Image (cartoon, rainbow, N blue to C red):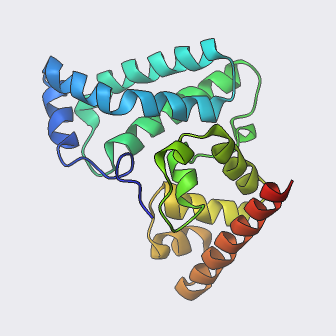
């Protein structure tokens, strides 16, 4: 299931990015208003640190994104591209403070974690609920690495089943089966967490 208010690509993102790269302040403001809040939430989720650290990395990410706008080619969603920049900034910060980037749980933005939970629509107030996000992150953290990696590639990186298969060195059918088992294991973990 998709949540169009966050995940649907905006058809004008690449146009706005090109205009902003050329100095169009209004285009930059539109991109900022569209993505800055969810980017902040993504960084907070990845960093799991102090508010000051989150704010600093958010600012660093926004500045790096503005400088890199001429490099945005539209092959990925604009938000995915922003998350890539943020991920590097978070990893750099974690190395500076002596934490391993691998110790931070998931590359999935919070709204994409929620995409794995249910196939039915969820009300907006549930989407915003931190406890739901925490439960999904916890459940994914309890999965075997193979399951987590496949789910991240398929749903966060939006790889096709063929691309996941190639990356993990399995055939198409075996990868489909692995993804089905991974989704089932995630549902089971979420059920266990809900009963606690």
Give above or below for 193 relative to 101. Answer: below
Q: Residue furthest right?
A: 196
Residue sitting at x 38%, y 41% = 79
Nearest the camera: 169 or 8?
8
Is 166 placed left or right of 142 in the picture? left
Residue 174's spot in the image, x, y percent? 62, 85
Nearest the camera: 33 or 143?
33
Residue 18's spot in the image, x, y percent? 16, 33
Q: Quadrant of residue 116?
A: bottom right
**Residue 154 visible in the picture:** yes
Give above or below for 71 relative to 191. Answer: above
Q: Quadrant of residue 3?
A: bottom left
**Looking at the figure, which quarter contains the N terminus?**
bottom left
Nearest the camera: 25 or 191?
191
Residue 187's spot in the image, x, y percent? 70, 67
Residue 98's spot in the image, x, y percent? 77, 23
Q: Quadrant of residue 70?
A: top left
Q: Residue furthest bottom?
A: 173
**Residue 88 visible in the picture:** no
Is 111 placed left or right of 52 in the picture? left
**Number of numbered discs on residues:** 0
Is 160 placed left or right of 137 in the picture? left
Residue sitting at x 61%, y 74% = 179
Residue sitting at x 22%, y 28% = 30
Residue sitting at x 49%, y 21% = 58
């Amino acid at each position: 299931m998709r949540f169009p208010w966050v995940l649907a690509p905006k058809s004008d993102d690449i146009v706005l990015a090109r205009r902003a790269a050329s100095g169009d302040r209004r285009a930059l403001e539109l991109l900022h208003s569209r993505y800055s809040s969810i980017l902040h939430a993504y960084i907070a989720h990845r960093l799991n640190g102090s508010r000051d650290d989150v704010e600093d990395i958010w600012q660093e990410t926004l500045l790096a994104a503005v400088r890199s706008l001429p490099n945005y080619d539209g092959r990925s969603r604009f938000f995915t591209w922003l998350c890539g920049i943020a991920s590097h900034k978070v990893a750099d910060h974690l190395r500076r403070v002596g934490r391993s980037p691998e110790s931070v749980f998931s590359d999935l933005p919070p709204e994409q974690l929620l995409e794995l939970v249910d196939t039915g629509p969820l009300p907006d107030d549930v989407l915003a609920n931190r406890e739901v996000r925490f439960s999904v992150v916890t459940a994914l953290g309890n999965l075997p690495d193979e399951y987590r990696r496949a789910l991240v590639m398929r749903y966060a990186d939006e790889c096709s089943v063929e691309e996941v298969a190639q990356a993990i060195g399995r055939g198409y059918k075996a990868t489909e089966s692995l993804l089905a088992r991974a989704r089932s294991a995630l549902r089971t973990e979420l059920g266990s967490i809900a009963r606690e």
